[in-house]
Amino acid sequence: MQHTTRRPARPRQSAAARGVIARSLCARTLAAGALAVGSVALAATPALAAPAPIAPGITSGSITAPATATVGDVVDASIALTGTSAVYAYELVVDYDPAVLDYVDGSATAPDGGFDAVDEQDGTLTVTHTRLGTSPELAGDLAVDLQFAAIGAGDGTLGFSSVTLVSSEGLTTTLAAPSAAPLAVTAAAVPPVDPAPVPVPDPSTPAGGGTAPVPSPTSSAASASSASGPLAFTGAEVLPGILAGAAVLLAGVAAVVVAQVRRRRSAGTR
């Protein structure tokens, strides 16, 4: 006898269930296709390149100052940097004659928001400015003011020999010998000094100084009276008196001698 094995019948799926399954399979198929297309697109698109660093820029640089000055004056100089861009730091170099000009300490100006330094070495002035941290770069027209003291006569030309700009990425731009400012310093005028007047001697002034006495009528009369008194004699008038006195004295002495001789004779006769 032949036995027949029957498989159990699968439960029939409803139309709604068949629709859900169909839609699920379709969604999976679409998702797999989209993933494959996205992978192909990513593989075909090159990576975005980082922007290239930009070097700082400058159009021109110049220095201005008065054309003339006098020893003792303070000279105002100004440096102009025109059309700059991407400037994170700069270095300016100015040349001058140290026998004619001397930099005034602390006179250099700089933009706000940075660190400044000035180095003075034997006629060369180096002015440095740098931004700090995340400070924005500088751009446009920049100005730096300086002052110099005129200490000697001569050629005081200010030479703006170079300017170096540095970007935040470390790129540099240098502009050599952009400008010069001729300056002639002259010596201060010395006022003329009048010579001291030479004193003219006054005839009425005694040689030893003082004021000559002016005789009065009373003093003149007294002088005349004194001159005519018993003591007012000159040498010529006194000499005859002296001789007469000497003669009288000798006569007296002779009389005394004669008297004594006579007495002696009288005594001998007795």
Image: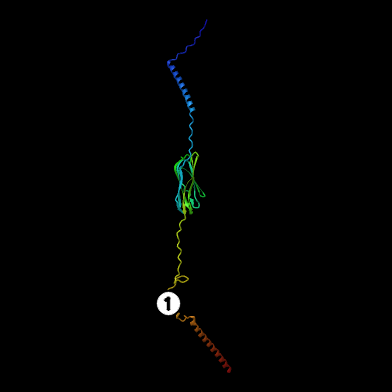
Q: Which residue is mark 1?
A: 220
For the view shown, which residue lies furthest in the left direction? Answer: 217
Of residues 193 and 217, the one nearer the viewer is 193
Residue 210 vs 7, above or below: the answer is below
Q: Give the image's coloring scheme.
A: rainbow
Where on the picture, by quarter, is residue 197? bottom left
The amino acid on which the numbered mark 1 sits, given as a three-letter code, is Ser
Where on the picture, by quarter, is residue 253? bottom right
Residue 63 vs 204, above or below: the answer is above
Q: How many marks?
A: 1
Q: Position of residue 163 (x, y in %)?
A: 49, 44
- Within 10 Å of disc 1 (Cα), the crowding (few <14, some 14-19, many 20+) is few
Q: Position of residue 181 (x, y in %)?
A: 46, 49
For the view shown, which residue lies furthest in the bottom direction? Answer: 270
* Residue depicted at 42% across the width and 77% down the height: 220
For the view shown, which residue lies furthest in the top direction? Answer: 1
Q: Secondary structure at mark 1?
A: helix
Q: Quadrant of the C terminus?
A: bottom right
Residue 165 vs 225, above or below: the answer is above
Q: Position of residue 132 (x, y in %)?
A: 48, 41
Can the viewer see residue 220? yes
Of residues 46 and 236, the one nearer the viewer is 46
Residue 129 vs 202, above or below: the answer is above
Q: Position of residue 150 (x, y in %)?
A: 47, 52
Of residues 9 and 30, the one nearer the viewer is 30
